Image: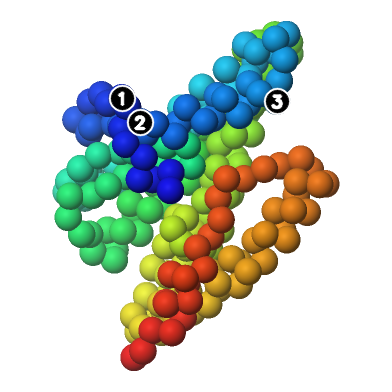
Amino acid sequence: MFGTSKPIFQFTGPFGVPVQFGASILLLPLIFVSFGDVATLHYDLIFVALLIGSIFLHELGHAWGCRVQGVPVRRIMIHGGGGFCEQSRAATYRQQEVIVAMGPIVNLMIWALASLGSQFFELGVLAWALYWLAMINLFLALFNLLPVHPLDGGKLFQLGLLRFLPAATATRISGGVGLAFAVLWLPGMLWLYFNVGLVLFFFPPIRPHLQMLRLKR
């Protein structure tokens, strides 16, 4: 749903890659602002800016992984549910490993640098921003490494299996693991909401995982 939203803004980013923002990106500030108040409005807007910037850098990591391997990138799209880096042609399995891994790696690098930087500031907006920049990127890295499609973790899990197993077998195993996560996702999200207050606008698709699981040799 989010990924099909029409672009409302576009610019040429690093490496000459077109960067587009879908209309659903407007949902993020609306959601965060609606749960806050006037006194904390500037903090809410800074948090949204950090989140969108971190998603952009995550996708830019994928684009860099494409570029260093000679795989052309058609565009980067940022939307209300995250983002994606669209390639102009298919990459080999080995190329995909680097391309997919670079997104979480970038988030982990930002987490490390922001955590280190926050040690030099004890109070103020900058200290707050660095802390949350670190937490956002740690969350994005760990979340994207979950072994479900279309997250990076699902792709990396399948690519890892392809190193040792036939393509059909690797696809079925990846689909089965992803399906198990998809079935347990809703009760897991309900538990997180009532115990932690965390809300995620992402649900692993059941049908594609089921199709992968049923793939014939």
Give the residue at x 25% y 24%: 11
Label 2–label 3 contact, CB within 8 A: no
Pointer 2 residue: 21
User: Residue 156 lies in what quarter of the image?
Assistant: bottom left
Mark 2 or 3, which is nearer the eye?
A: 3
Dot 1 and dot 2 residues touching (CB under 8 Å): yes
Q: Judge whether residue 130 can be spotted in this image.
A: no
**Mark 3, residue position:** 35
Query: Judging from the image, what secondary structure is the residue with disc 1 in?
Result: strand
Q: Image point 52% across, 51% down: which residue?
A: 144
Please name the residue that numbered disc 1 is placed on.
9
Residue type, mark 2 in image: Phe
Q: Are marks 1 and 3 in contact (CB under 8 Å)?
A: no
Residue 118 appears left or right of 165: right
Q: CA distance from mark 1 to mark 2?
A: 5 Å
Q: Position of residue 148 (x, y in %)?
A: 51, 63
